[in-house]
Image (tube, rainbow, N blue to C red):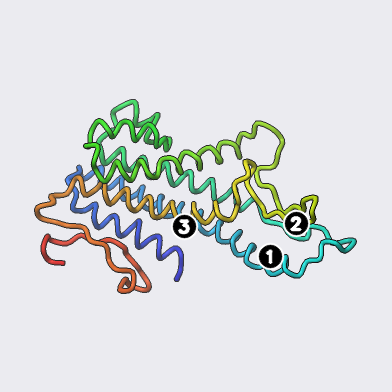
Amino acid sequence: MNNYHLVNARIVVGISDILSFAKIPPADKKEIETLLFELGKHINKAQLSSKKVMDEYEIQKNQIKNLDITKKGICPSLLTIHTCEVETSINFTKKALRYLTTIVGIVCQKQKLEIFEKGYKKGRFDSVLEDLKKDFPNDSTLLAILEEGAPWAAKLSLYRDNDEHPKDFAPFVKNYRIDADLNIIRPMLYDGTPLFEFLQESSTMILLFSEALLVSLLFEYIDENKFEIIEIPEQIRDTVFPKRFKILPKGLE
């Protein structure tokens, strides 16, 4: 399936459908629709960059099996990861998070507050979470999703900042290496985080987190006595345009 169609169906179209039922000023809805397009575009670009690295890794797994590093002239530099794609993925994911929190701020009518510029528009999930705790009950699904995703978002933001503003000259991504026992060490980020696991997690998380957060948020502004949001089982989703959620009059599922 085309990745663009998947992201577009689930973020741009799917969330916009739910947005149309929310009690939000029309002008704000129009701005949110534009931001949803940008959010979807950046998620797609982040995932494509991650996929390029993951595809490289799948090819190199077989190369590693046949690599005799005890032979003279064979060195780990034969295996390499295009680190620019790692940096691109992180950068687009960070931008997607900023679009996500900006949408949250507009839905919650925070535009005229100082926190909107300093927190929501900058993707500061810690600030956003603390601010929304004033507006929603502690047991709300919205806050639970934010609390679960905020640590990942904060770590992603830290990686992006350290990539753009390194504190030393150490490489952001450590490529394949050989240790003293002639074992091949897989690529990792500068702090020792395994690269491929990180990319897989981030590629999955940015879509699922954005989707879950926006669905739970918009439902707070929809008449739950009249409408309900249901998840379409994966096996019956449209194969070309697979929306995950849809809104229905209550009782018509």
Labels 2 and 3: the sequence-earlier one: 3
User: What kind of residue is marked 1?
Assistant: Gln
What's the residue at 39%, 34% (across, down)?
A: 126
Q: Quadrant of the C terminus?
A: bottom left
What's the residue at 10%, 55% (across, down)?
A: 226
Give the labeled residue for mark 1: 60
Percent of width and height locating residue 153: 45, 42
What's the residue at 33%, 46% (across, down)?
A: 145
Find the distance from the CA under tag 2 to the CA under tag 3.
Answer: 35 Å
User: What kind of residue is marked 3?
Assistant: Asn
Q: Residue furthest top?
A: 114
Labels 1 and 3: the sequence-earlier one: 3
Q: What number is the disc on residue 44?
A: 3
Give the labeled residue for mark 2: 183
Residue 29 vs 4, above or below: the answer is above
- Dots 2 and 3: beta carbons under 8 Å? no
Labels 1 and 2: the sequence-earlier one: 1
Label 2 vs label 3, nearer the camera: 2
Find the distance from the CA under tag 1 to the CA under tag 3.
Answer: 24 Å
Q: Nearer the viewer, residue 216 or 48?
A: 216
For label 3, the SS is helix
Find the distance from the CA under tag 1 to the CA under tag 2.
Answer: 15 Å
For label 2, the SS is loop
User: What kind of residue is marked 2?
Assistant: Asn
For label 1, the SS is helix
Percent of width and height locating residue 175: 70, 51
What's the residue at 49%, 53% (across, down)?
A: 201
